[in-house]
Amino acid sequence: MAKKLLSIRIVFSALVTLAFAYGVYEALGYAYLAKIFPLYVSLVLLAVGLINLALEIRDKWKGVAEAKSGGTADLEVKWDMQMSQVLQKFGVFVAVIIVLYGGIWFIGYPLSITIFIIVLYRYVAGTKWHWALVAGAAGLGFLALVSKLLYMDWPEGLIKLPWPLG
Amino acid sequence: MKKVIHSFIMIVMALLLAMPAAQAADFSGKTIEWIIPFRVGGGSDVWARLYAPFLQKYLPGNPVVAVKNMPGGGSIIGGNHFHTRARPDGLTVFGSSGSTSFPYLLENPKVKYDFAKYKIVFASPTGGVAYINPDLGVKSVEDLKNFGRELAYASQGATSLDIIPLLAFEMLGLNVKAVFGYKGRGPGRVAFEQGEVNIDYQTTTAFIKNVRPLIEQGKAVPLMSWGVLDADGNIVRDPIEPDLPSLPEAYEIKYGEKPKGPAFNAWKAFMIAGFGVQKAMWLPEGTPDDIVQAYREAATKVIADPEFQQVVEKSLGGYPQMAGEEARKAFDQVLQVPAADKKWLINWLKEKYDVKLD
Amino acid sequence: METVFQSLGVVLQPGHLLMLLCGVVMGLSIGILPGLGGIVGMTILLPVIYGMDPHSAFGLLIGMVAVIPTSDTFPSVMMGIPGSSASQATIMDGYPLAKKGEAARALGAAFTASLIGGLFGALVLTLIIPIARPLVLAFGSPELFMLALLGMSMVGVLSGNRPIKGILAAGIGVMIGALGDAPAVPEYRYTFGIDYLMDGIPLVVVGLGLFAFPEIVDLLIKGRAISETTTLGKGWLDGVKDTLKHKFIVLRCSVIGVIVGFLPGLGGSVVDWIAYGHIIQTSRDREKFGKGDIRGVIAPESANNAKEGGGLIPTFLFGIPGSGSMAVFLGGLLILGIQPGPSMVTENVDLIYTAIWSLALANVIGATLSIALSKPITRLTVIPFSYLAPFMVLIITFACYQATRSWGDLVALLLMGILGWIMKQYGWPRPAALIGYVLSDNLETYLFISVQRYGAEWLTRTGVLVLGAIIVFSVGMGIFFQTKRRAPASGGEHGEKAA
């Protein structure tokens, strides 16, 4: 039975409900003035969350599909591939971003993002190397420009590189 | 040979004589980073940016003085950053305001910065004037003697600069309900005009611009000012409103004796931190004396500059700015508040406003 | 009346115009990039005016403030990324239009609406100034709470036929907004002891995380371009014509913009949503809203430029910023030695009129420039997204970092991005979350103050009752039209049977 009910949709709803439960729990410990709002809002939302969860479980159990027309475009997601494939690709993207962050941590933002641009241009967009390098240079150039003109900062890495690479 | 040795000694002596001069602080070609732990456009940011071009003019070597905003955590984040990162080479300075001093005084555990260790360069005082709704029938502090009605005051929070008015009202025996949640004195003033609250205070520049017209229209009655420090560290009347009593005077009017005790001592120390030396510029711990001297001298010259005096009149409340020793003595009054009085205040906040300063 | 024309004369002086133009160009260049518009943009640009002489700097300042709502429209339409203080609701219909290949039309309509809306707003403003003070003073904390609640009620409109998820999404937004320092007490909520969270998660991070991040991922996964058609459809001229056709919408929404804009403390951020919600609730055929109805672009865009003009009122008359960008603008005024306050109506009323007309003019310049830019920029919608994606990542990470300049920004961006993506896949309305987040502080603060100050009495105030009635009425109308539309179909949130 559990397997039939297990789907990311339901897990997410459950997590949201759990989050509000936590909200209530935490809010109880705050000073009076600070607790009222989050406490009551969390309580109401916890109730609504439970209702939502119950309805979703009921629907999954009965095999009812989620209503197609959400009404607004942002609620309609159409994929012409399996959801599992979509999730996989999402995972890859998140992993890439984490690697980017790791890069920023070590060698600072400008160099990391430049490498990121070059790599993506070569391997995702499929361009030749020299175009990828041009794109990377454009990115770096933009960063250099705004930081000089407008005093904008970027994260520095553990290894400090000369401007504008770090 | 003799000639060579002779010239050699001359050169060495010349160099030795030239060295002390080279050791005097000189910032030519350098950029001074002035950390302001507040957002762009806020009161302290404006203050710093009004000072910056004049400091550039008078600091030896005419360095660029660049304001770096680091808002966050109510100015604690910027303060901590200055404390941990600033090197004592005169190239990084810090601008603090009352909201930076208060958490420090209240021993907020998140505070890492320590004013006792830094060197003050200059300080800018300001004042506060309290006023009340005319419908209550109060025409001056005299009428407060037997006034028992509940008043409402628009407050930002019990640990903000509002400690000053709240404690002042308490000392005067007024029954004031603090309504928390307002985002600053500006909204507080609007709330007063709307009738949502009936007692309020404003800092001098806002008072002049926004409250005086109300007084003229009969919509507000001025009560008292907090007062300003004189050269000996006593609180005297604020020159902005010379006809209004200062808080200690108001106290005397009501009770017939001068204020004393832990409540007043705490109030005085916090008042100085929040108003008497509200904004100050600091050099980090361990900064060599010649750099400190150079800064203080530059600040003195800035203050004496007639063009700057106009700026002070127009935008900084017209109060005499303090530099060097004067600023240091004034801020020492803040740093030297006895522990017992501080404790009293922390306790008062806890009892009355349920403030947990864990 | 004289002063009005006098100020117009000042505004049209070549020196002033030049400065306005500079301000507009600067504002546009920064604001066009997602995440760098709005308050972030103003904060970056403001230091430029320090040290300039007051008259020139004033023009520059106004120019910058004026184009923030205009430039925000580009990321809204092109990628569905909400701006930080304006052009939020524009994503609902602007982005679907871009996906259909009609980005130029959406932009054309948006900028024309901005232009007309801005001008009309300036006119209304000029007329209101004499009664501005009492009007502002009439809105106390209880009334402001009701207005925030009105903004929240728009969530219903945005949830399509998933009201429960809409409420939950709004709730998520509210709780994220409550994160950080409590409005009145030195208490830090839900921070897990992390310093970064002490001030809460910045709007830029929430907006870019919830909207930009999922969009980038999805477009990469799909492997196509933003526009689902390979040729660009209707052009900007069609957009202009659309706006002129719906001129009453423009005028109505611009009035809404001015009025909500000049109430201090609402942040002006709800204006878009109120205008958007209003247009849906008052339209007979609402089938296409949320899917690319041009009216869904015209309404919020008319309102948000008018709102900047409205925001000048509390800023000048009370010294209280009407919105985030006004707060920075106010700082600019103080640097220029201009002290706003009640005496301005008597002493410097000419300055106020100069500001209003400069704003209107800057609006015109900004909108015209933007229309000129829209053709080349919309070409980006047909380029395979993989060429744009890396730069998008650069811009959004960079923009987020400017929020607090700490690592927390980047981490929060990723986390919000993952949350936003999941919400997108499983039908949780993210605009509802955005509204909840934006209004969280106001809702709590004004409710708080109302209860503290008035006990339960605040509910019986006239303003509160009137606003309450408006809310009930608008929500009611929404439900009424909804059920009418749904009657034939047997759909619903949890209703359709699987095949």
Image: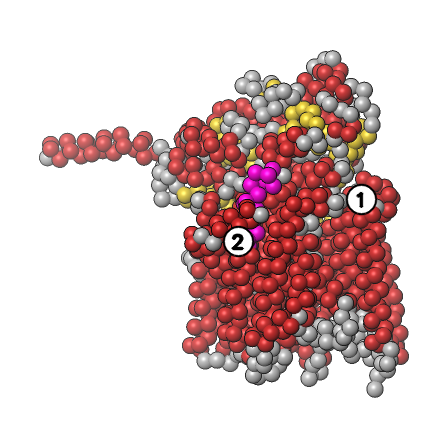
Closest to the observer, C350 or B211: C350
Location of residue B168 (image quadrant): top right
What residue do we see at 51% from left, 34% from top?
B314
> Does the magenta-highlighted stretch encompass residue C157?
no
What residue do we see at 69% from left, 54% from top?
C260
Q: Quadrant of the C terminus of chain C?
A: bottom right
> Does the magenta-highlighted stretch encompass residue C351?
yes
Circle 1 residue: C450
Closest to the observer, B237 or C407: B237
* Magenta region, residue range: C343-359
From this viewpoint, is residue B317 visible? Answer: yes
Dot 1: what SS?
helix
What residue do we see at 74% from left, 39% from top?
B194
Dot 2: what SS?
helix
Q: Amino acid at mark 1?
A: Ser
Report in which chain the residue with disc 2 lies: C
Kindly indicate whether the residues beneath marks 2 and 1 are on one polypeptide chain: yes
Count numbered badges in the picture: 2
Report in which chain the residue with disc 1 lies: C
Say the numbered circle drawn on residue C358: 2
Location of residue B248 (image quadrant): top right
Q: Is A108 above or below relative to C385?
A: above
Closest to the observer, C10 or C326: C10
Q: Position of residue C359 (x, y in %)?
A: 55, 54
Around disc 1, counting alpha carbons within 10 Å, would you say few (fewer than 14), some (14 to 19), or many (20 or more)? many
Q: Is A97 above or below relative to B197?
A: below
Measured Cα–Cα span from mark 2 to mark 1: 37 Å
Q: Amino acid at mark 2?
A: Ser
